[in-house]
Image: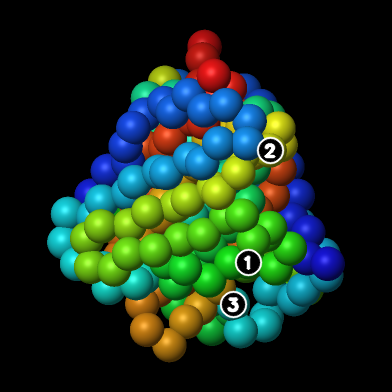
Amino acid sequence: EIVMTQSPATLSVSPGDRATLSCGASQSIFTNLAWYQQKPGQAPRLLISGASTRATGVPARFSGSGSGTEFTLTISSLQSEDFAVYYCQQYNDWPLTFGGGTKVEIK
Amino acid sequence: QVQLQESGPGLVKPSETLFLTCTVSGSSVSSSYYWGWIRQSPGKGLEWIGSMFHSGNTYYNPSLKSRVTISLDTSKNQLSLKLRSMTAADTAVYYCARRITVPVGVGWFDPWGQGILVTVSS
């Protein structure tokens, strides 16, 4: 099983600032990585697939990068609606696995 | 617009079997996607349970494989989950989701249902 590790667990950021979230895989997953955003009481929402391709309707301030075992989600200028929990998911191999999440909170 | 809606009991007794249904609208479960279940508990985060294609091709998480069955009902455009021998550790929010298939790798989930909280307690 591929283990996904996210850091930090919590990120305190001021509105308008940049947020950088990390996701690591226990073995190479190439670019077979997705990012999701989850707000309280809601289901996860797809943000990015293929490590860097934004889903339909996702604002350009969200960007993903990385390949192999190290990945990054960057939110260039945090808006109030961006404070949420973010998860990465590898889809290189079965079983599909998720990271533990990074909570982005208001500083 | 594809929408998924889970339904089923919110409370299950230990050792009983959980039955959940997911009704799909805006897409057919007979289309070229896998359909699956994911759960989320405070202790274990997001955990993929399994996925099924209308051809019958099914993949399960090895950690749950001995207790889980996923099926598709094309006449009702629904997928279902059966999880046997429930324990407190199975308390979670259960989501159904469409899995996007890709030429390389397995695929990601989009969209998701709103989720249903299932508590295991006597």
Residue A50 placement: quadrant:
bottom left
Amino acid type, callout 3 = Tyr
Is B86 rendered above or below residue B53? above
- Number of marks: 3
Q: Residue at x 64, y 61 (%)?
A: A60
Q: Residue furthest bottom?
A: B103
- Secondary element under disc 2, as helix, strand or loop, is loop
Residue under the image location 51 percent in, 59 percent down: A63
Whether labels 2 and 3 belong to a single chain: the reply is no
User: Which mark's residue is nearer the viewer, 2 or 3?
Assistant: 2
- Mark 3 vs mark 1, CA separation in Å: 17 Å
Q: Secondary structure at mark 1?
A: loop
Mark 1 vs mark 2: which is more N-terminal? 1
Which circle marks residue A55 in the picture?
1
Does residue B56 sit above or below B65 in this rendering? below
**Neighbour class for label 1 at 10 Å: few (<14), some, many (≥20)?**
some
CB atoms of marks 1 and 2 within 8 Å: no
Which mark, residue B33? Answer: 3
SS under mark 3: loop
Q: Is residue A44 left or right of residue B66?
A: right
Q: Name the spot of residue A40 as percent of width and height, x first.
A: 65, 28
Near-viewer residue (A25 or B37): A25
The residue pinned by badge 2 equals A79
Q: Is residue B6 left or right of residue B52?
A: right
Label 2 CA crowd tier, 10 Å (few <14, some 14–19, many 20+): some
